[in-house]
Image (tube, rainbow, N blue to C red):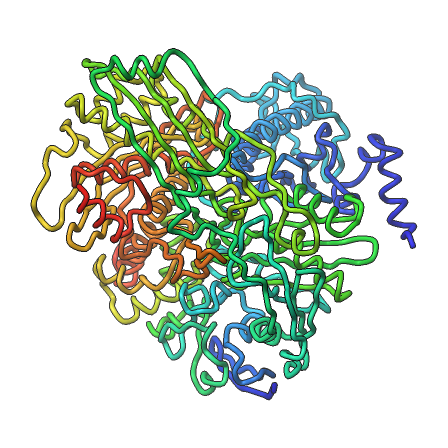
């Protein structure tokens, strides 16, 4: 039966629209399904009677500082202090839809919206103040939300007194002028992260802490390690009697989806471990040893991404030519905390709390899965541990929703470590092959890149196990060979880039993992460029300078080299017979729009094959750096994570299942091998912000590979640079 | 089956109804509602769930609750009090110097691993007031961070060490 009050709430807003919305008090938010109308100022911010403001943003705090950076922009534009501006939890009934928090978009895409909305609100506030004070707007000045008359500061009124918790009721036109960079007080400064005090004192509420009255604890039961995406996981038999001794536990099954619920969390954990399920184990995977061979031999869908000039002819005529391969691994998001969700699904509505990067996207998936209209599903965001892309947050939200729907109670589901590691949407493996050539003067004349990989999966495991067909994500630039990372930073006349798309259903589940594919592209591409420098007898930094004209690429290249005190020398010109040798390398790279440069100093033990980064330097030009402190922190994380991905991380599989299921079978970098890091932000306050969460990684990957060559005189073709792989390469020479 | 157990957490006695083999972590999270110790792997591999048991860093995800009866458990929330009693301070500071140093270094990213990082660093500094870089790395090596905050954590521990010795910040 339809709840009449709900019907009126939803229908009322829909029918009466703008005028009623305009009259809703700020605290009325949350009663109507969003997204709120992006063309209204009230959707973006509210001014309170105590002269503070709430900014409603659609981007999630993932530990990158979004809930500091975006309020910084708003406060600056409104002439408020940081302490006067707050944000609220992302909620499909409350916050605007700015798209997902991926592609390093919070500041890049969200910043202009927040800034122009704040500027427009300020203009409206000044207009109100003008009437109140009887002075023209150009005679008014604002500080900390207090509007006063120039030359007579005692004539004043606060924002709070002007609108105090009442809506603006005006459209957001985006036409109010914004401040020039010279007027900024907060933008461009290192405002400390606002979420940090609660995070170090244990007062922060992560999703994993959320409990609701009357809820059950739940765990899913899946095979340890996924099979090929297209194969899903097939239940052959479930022995319900195998958990009969755990009185509080109840088995739930829908198709091949199996889970347990219990009032006590430990009962749920024990029951999931103890439940005897027989799964189909037919081999559906290539296995780690054959992975790249199978990829290279696969029937692919090919696309010429870029073709200009005559690559073959230029290579044939060139003084120096090189070829370089990259065999890149599957890598896992492996968030430090396995994903969790709390779901309360009723007959006609659902509330789901989870750590999604996109509350509105997750709402759509839940609506399809539960058979509820989109407006009847409400999704709230709680931060989990860092996700670095599409980890299992959608999957766990869907699984919790199914378990709640089946049990008739609110359910808190926490994935176990092996669920998260084993059923991730991995960053896809890659085969890259580059050919490049330079003339006798050290000018790059030709470049050709072929890349093989599959795309991203678009059906969550829960949906698939309950009957939905596995489907691949529609194509996009970030998951294919592209001109950004494949030679695009250099001035080259003859270029050919070809993408070879693999059939995703035959491989592991894929998803966007921080700086998707960029590390692999750069590992191949930046080594090829470096090898040309070597053949031309030039210092690799100088060689890159000679082949670049874009001042922003040159800016980060120079910044990284300067930070590292780079001295000119040809690579591999100081080879040594010692057991432990050192090397340094340089590289550039990006993800979508910003510019990254890096220098790596590494140490190679030729007897054990162990490679350790001693110092990594990373420089970014992301246009206007709103909070350089946050960005230095992001660069630090990118450099350490790149070291982890270049030296340690590789998802392994048998022909039946993924075998990387925990931190022992999927090692990551630890304190003992952590490099020193130097982060450099190339500030360009007058350029638009372009994102800072990913772009140094590809540069650092290339720099590390090149440092290995400098240390050993050997080019690696596969990463991670594990000891066995390094020893084999050194032996081959 | 669930029986009554008495445990001392952050200097307070608690009576909880739990099966003796229940990992301490679940009791701290669900029965005591603490936010410090938290689930990360359930395998004692990552350090997310760390607490001090009689001053020794312990993985609560694999420690049966029955084995800590009669012992003193300190969680992230209790570190300022624990520090004050160790140092015989007249007044409990708002934060342990390690917590303050992590803020000063702006070390945190997602912050989920910082429960274990802080607990372990506090244990280290209680035993070794002036650890070298190598000693810090060795002590902290069983604590993983996925965001890549290690370099700043090392700096923060060095900073806290100076502060605790009465030096300038």
Eyeballing the image, is A86 above or below A593? below
Q: In the rendered image, which quarter contains the N terminus of chain A?
A: bottom right
Q: Nearer the viewer, residue B127 or A705?
A: A705
Q: Residue at x 64, y 28 (%)?
A: A117
- Give the image quarter of residue A47: top right
Residue A185 appears anywhere in the view = no
Q: Residue furthest left?
A: A577
**Residue A225: % across, % down:** 51, 59
Q: Nearer the viewer, residue A283 or B96?
A: A283
Total labels: the figure holds 0
Eyeballing the image, is A257 above or below B90? above
Residue A142 appears anywhere in the view = yes
Q: Residue at x 52, y 82 (%)?
A: B21
Eyeballing the image, is A125 above or below B165? above
**Residue A688: % across, % down:** 49, 23
Q: Residue at x 44, y 44 (%)?
A: A192
Q: Nearer the viewer, residue A556 or A515?
A: A515
Q: Residue at x 29, y 39 (%)?
A: A717
Q: Is residue A643 left or right of residue A170?
A: left
Q: In the rendered image, which quarter contains the C terminus of chain A?
A: top left
**Residue A582: % across, % down:** 16, 43
Q: Nearer the viewer, residue A652 or A58?
A: A652
């Amino acid at each position: 039966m339809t709840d009449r009050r709900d019907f009126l709430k939803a229908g009322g807003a829909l029918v009466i629209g703008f005028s009623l919305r305009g009259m809703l008090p700020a605290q009325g938010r949350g009663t109507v399904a969003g997204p709120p109308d992006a063309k209204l100022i009230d959707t973006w911010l509210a001014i309170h009677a105590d002269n503070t403001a709430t900014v409603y943003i659609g981007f999630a705090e993932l530990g990158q500082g979004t809930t500091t950076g975006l309020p910084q922009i708003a406060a600056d534009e409104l002439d408020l202090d940081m302490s006067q501006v707050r944000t609220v939890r992302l909620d499909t009934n409350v916050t605007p839809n700015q798209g997902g928090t991926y592609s390093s978009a919070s500041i890049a895409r969200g910043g202009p919206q927040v800034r122009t909305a704040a500027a427009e609100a300020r203009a409206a506030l000044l207009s109100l103040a003008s009437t109140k004070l009887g002075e023209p707007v150009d005679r008014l000045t604002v500080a900390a939300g207090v509007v006063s008359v120039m030359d007579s500061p005692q004539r004043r009124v606060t924002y709070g007194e002007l609108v105090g918790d009442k809506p603006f009721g005006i459209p957001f036109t985006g036409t109010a002028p914004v401040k020039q960079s010279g007027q900024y007080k907060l933008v461009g400064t290192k405002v400390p992260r606002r979420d940090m005090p609660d995070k170090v004192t244990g007062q922060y509420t992560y999703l994993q802490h959320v409990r609701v009255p009357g809820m059950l604890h739940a765990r899913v039961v899946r095979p340890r390690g996924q099979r090929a995406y297209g194969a899903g996981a097939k239940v052959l038999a479930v022995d319900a009697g195998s958990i009969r001794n755990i009185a509080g536990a109840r088995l739930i099954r829908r198709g091949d989806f199996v889970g347990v619920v219990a009032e006590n969390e430990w009962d749920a954990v024990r029951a999931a471990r103890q439940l005897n399920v027989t799964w189909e184990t037919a081999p559906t995977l290539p296995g780690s040893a054959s992975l790249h061979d199978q990829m290279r031999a696969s029937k692919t869908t090919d696309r010429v991404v870029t073709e200009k000039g005559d690559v073959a002819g230029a290579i044939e005529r060139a003084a120096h030519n090189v070829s370089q391969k990259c065999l890149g691994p599957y890598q896992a998001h492996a968030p430090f905390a396995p994903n969790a969700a709390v779901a309360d699904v009723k007959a006609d509505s659902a509330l789901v709390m989870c750590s999604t990067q996109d509350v509105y996207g997750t709402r759509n998936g839940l609506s399809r899965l539960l058979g509820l209209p989109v407006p009847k599903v409400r999704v709230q965001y709680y931060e989990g541990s860092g996700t670095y892309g599409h980890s299992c947050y959608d999957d766990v939200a869907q699984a919790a929703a199914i378990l709640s729907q089946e049990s008739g109670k609110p359910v808190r589901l926490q994935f176990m470590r092996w669920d998260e590691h084993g059923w991730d949407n991995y960053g896809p493996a890659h085969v890259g092959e580059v050919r490049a050539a330079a003339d006798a003067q050290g000018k790059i004349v030709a470049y050709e890149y072929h890349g093989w990989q599959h795309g991203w999966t678009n059906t969550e495991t829960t949906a698939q196990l309950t009957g939905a067909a596995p489907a691949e994500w529609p194509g996009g630039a970030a998951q294919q060979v592209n001109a950004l990372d494949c030679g695009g930073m250099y001035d080259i006349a003859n270029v050919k880039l070809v993408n070879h798309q693999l059939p995703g259903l035959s491989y592991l589940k894929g998803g966007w993992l921080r700086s998707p594919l960029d590390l692999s592209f750069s590992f191949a591409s930046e080594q090829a460029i470096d090898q040309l420098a070597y053949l031309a007898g030039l210092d690799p930094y100088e060689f890159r300078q000679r082949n670049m004209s874009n001042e922003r690429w040159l800016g980060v290249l120079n910044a990284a080299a300067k930070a590292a005190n780079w001295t000119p020398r040809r690579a591999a010109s100081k080879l040594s017979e010692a057991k432990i040798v050192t090397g340094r390398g340089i590289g550039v790279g990006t993800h979508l729009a910003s510019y990254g440069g890096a220098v790596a100093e590494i140490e190679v033990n030729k007897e054990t094959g162990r490679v350790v980064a001693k110092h990594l330097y990373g420089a970014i030009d992301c246009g206007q750096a709103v909070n350089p402190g946050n960005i230095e922190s992001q660069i630090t994380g990118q450099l350490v994570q790149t070291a982890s991905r270049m030296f340690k991380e590789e998802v392994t599989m048998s022909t039946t299942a993924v075998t990387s299921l925990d931190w022992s079978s999927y090692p990551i970098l630890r304190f003992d091998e952590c490099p020193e890091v130097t982060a450099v932000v190339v500030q360009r306050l007058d350029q638009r912000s372009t994102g800072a969460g990913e772009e140094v990684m590809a540069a650092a990957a290339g720099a590390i590979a090149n440092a290995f060559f400098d240390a050993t005189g050997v080019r690696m073709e596969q990463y991670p640079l594990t000891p066995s792989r390094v020893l084999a390469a050194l032996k081959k020479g | 089956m669930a029986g009554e157990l008495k445990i001392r957490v952050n200097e307070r006695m608690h009576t909880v109804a739990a099966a003796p083999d229940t990992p301490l972590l679940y009791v701290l999270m669900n029965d005591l509602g603490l936010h410090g110790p938290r689930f990360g792997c359930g395998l004692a591999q990552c350090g997310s769930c760390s607490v001090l048991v009689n001053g020794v860093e312990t993985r609560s995800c694999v420690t049966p609750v029955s084995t800590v009866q009669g012992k003193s458990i300190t969680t992230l929330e209790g570190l300022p009090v624990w520090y004050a009693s160790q140092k015989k301070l007249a007044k409990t500071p708002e934060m342990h110097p390690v917590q303050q140093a992590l803020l000063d270094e702006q070390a945190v990213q997602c912050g989920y691993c910082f429960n274990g990082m802080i607990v372990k660093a506090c244990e280290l500094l209680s035993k070794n007031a002036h650890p070298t870089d190598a000693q810090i790395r060795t002590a902290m090596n069983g604590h993983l961070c996925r965001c890549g905050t290690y370099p700043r954590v090392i700096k923060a521990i060095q900073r806290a060490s100076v502060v605790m010795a009465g030096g300038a910040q």
